[in-house]
Image (cartoon, helix red, strand yellow):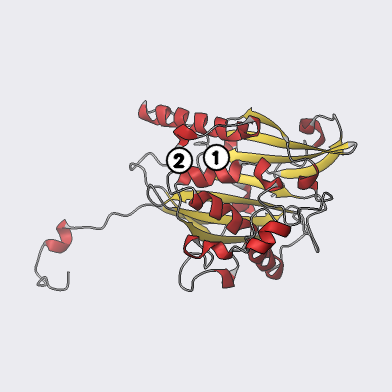
Amino acid sequence: MPSEPPDSLFKSKVTVESYPTYEAGGIIWTYMGPAGTAPEPPGYELLRVPATHRFVSKTFEYANFAQALEGGLDTAHSSFLHNMNLGDKSFLRNADTAPRLEVERTDYGFRYAGIRAVGSEDYVRVYHYIMPTTQLRGFVSGNQGKNHLPTIHGHFWIPIDDETTSVYNFMYSFYPEQPLSLEYAIQRETDAGRGPDDLIPGTFKLKQNLANDYFIDRHVQKTQTFTGIPGINTQDIALQEGMGSIVDRSKEHLGTTDRAIIVTRQLLLEAADEVEKDGEPRARDPQTYAGVRAADRLIPSGTRWQDALKEDVVAKY
């Protein structure tokens, strides 16, 4: 307080609240709970990846944290929302638009597989939900576009308040011997719609937003894509924000491919009950998820994905 005289005791009585921080993986982490109750530092594989092999960005979203989280954890929508060529059935996620979902609860949340039939094979995408805010997904197999580099992607959805969310987006190289170039990362971010030129300068907010209908092109929507909106990430945000900042879930009808969303809600409610009883919620111990990673593969039809992808879903860093 510059207006206080030098001998004032004001400075010794009024302080600014602060929280312990931890820097890793290109992100500053903080614990905002009661003093003395902080868990060990986060255990994500991302935090052990060298800077030459990873990339992190941040975007702002006008949606409730749970809404954004559920949009990210859902796997079936990618066959529709992110279908960039309605007539192209060669893209693996377009070959079977009704994937089978298998969800396995774990000490950190759950892992689940979206299984799509592709001829005599199954295209399997194994995700992880690490409570309460994290999703991991892999892009390993081919058919991912020109100059594809096997990578693991994910998000941390961090609530700002009841109606807005900060989203930390990350990617890192699947193979430790294969660095991730900045040029490749920027191109992937740009394809997603959140590249450096897609943000309002000085902010983490997208130029494509609800106020301008996310630059929707009705002709493209009619002839080429489901949305007519450029940018895969922007397509997600258009749906998550477009339903209102807090959607009325009492009016929804969940289907068979919403199994991951159903389990997510069950686990979040379970965690709230545990905290209320001074219990230990899932994923509090970072060792429960330190060794996991996401992956996708084509495997022989009928093969157990748990066996076929056993090595792929173990951390390599």
Within-10-Å neighbours for mark 2: few <14, some 14–19, many 20+: few
Q: Nearer the viewer, residue 12 or 62?
A: 62
Q: Are marks 1 and 2 in contact (CB under 8 Å)?
A: yes
| Mark count | 2
Q: Is residue 292 visible?
A: no
Q: How far across and down, in percent of the image, does residue 204 sit?
A: 48, 65
Mark linked to residue 39: 2
Q: Earlier in the sequence, mark 1 or mark 2?
A: 2
Residue 83, x across and y down, in percent: 72, 52
Q: Is residue 279 above or below residue 237?
A: above
Q: State left or right for residue 106 relative to residue 202.
A: right
Task: Measure the C-alpha gap from mark 1 to mark 2.
Answer: 8 Å
Q: Is residue 298 left or right of residue 16?
A: right
Residue at coordinates 63% horizontally, 45% vertically from top-left? 136
Look at 73% across and 44% down and name the residue there. 295
Question: Which amino acid type is shown beneath numbered disc 1?
Answer: Pro
Query: Residue, x 81% and y 49% (percent of image)?
Result: 141
* Amino acid type of the residue tagged 2 in the rendering: Pro
Determine which residue is flagged by label 1.
286
Residue 101 % position (x, y):
69, 32
Q: Nearer the viewer, residue 264 or 211?
A: 211
Say above or below: 130 vs 227: above
Q: Is residue 216 visible?
A: yes
Residue 246, placed above or below residue 47: above
- Answer with left or right where residue 117 lies relative to residue 78: right
